[in-house]
Amino acid sequence: MKTYEEKWLADGKYMSHNIVNEIIGLAGNKCLRKTCEVKTASVFSLIADGTSDESRTEQLVLCVRWVDRQFPIHEEPVGLYAMNFTDAESIEKGVLDVLIRLQLDIKSCHGQGIKWGIKYEW
């Protein structure tokens, strides 16, 4: 059975750029869930760090760290966000976005690390 994306591409009828961007985002989330094996772990940790890029835009990087059944440590970057503000509410939105996209339960998060240097505003 063909997926929606395959049917859409085969159909040849293209939609507005907003709908195309939404489909690309959904496909990206699906790929991210398949490649990120964190769901096989019973617990995980979230790591958030920030810095500014060349254009002086603050960037939030989110990583997930876990240990699998053979005990090697895995750490994968799962989100990169341009931040207008570096307050707790803005960082929370990024963290919640990662949890939702990866379908992770916050109750399984047994560690967190947030580092933002001196500019961090709680």
Image: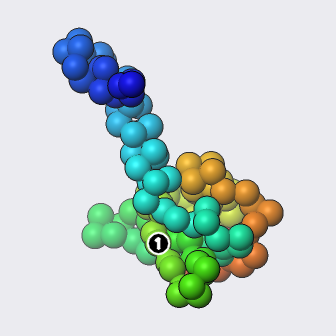
76 vs 122, nearest the viewer: 76
Q: Is residue 6 left or right of residue 112?
A: left
Q: Quadrant of residue 92?
A: bottom right
Residue in view at x 46 percent, y 54 percent: 34
110 vs 60, nearest the viewer: 110
Residue 1: x and y in percent read 39, 25
Regarding residue 79, the answer to whether it shows in the image is yes
Q: Quadrant of residue 66?
A: bottom right
Q: Quadrant of the C terminus?
A: bottom right
Q: Residue furthest front?
A: 1
Q: Quadrant of residue 67?
A: bottom right
Residue 88: x and y in percent read 69, 63
Q: Looking at the image, is 104 positioned above or below residue 121?
A: above
Regarding residue 119, the answer to whether it shows in the image is no
80 vs 117, nearest the viewer: 80
Residue 61: x and y in percent read 48, 68
Residue in view at x 75 percent, y 66 percent: 108
Residue 32: x and y in percent read 44, 54
Three-letter code for the amino acid on which mark 1 is drawn: Glu
Residue in view at x 53 percent, y 87 percent: 72
Q: Looking at the image, is 101 positioned above or below residue 117?
A: above
Residue at the spot of label 1: 76
Q: Is residue 59 left or right of residue 8?
A: right
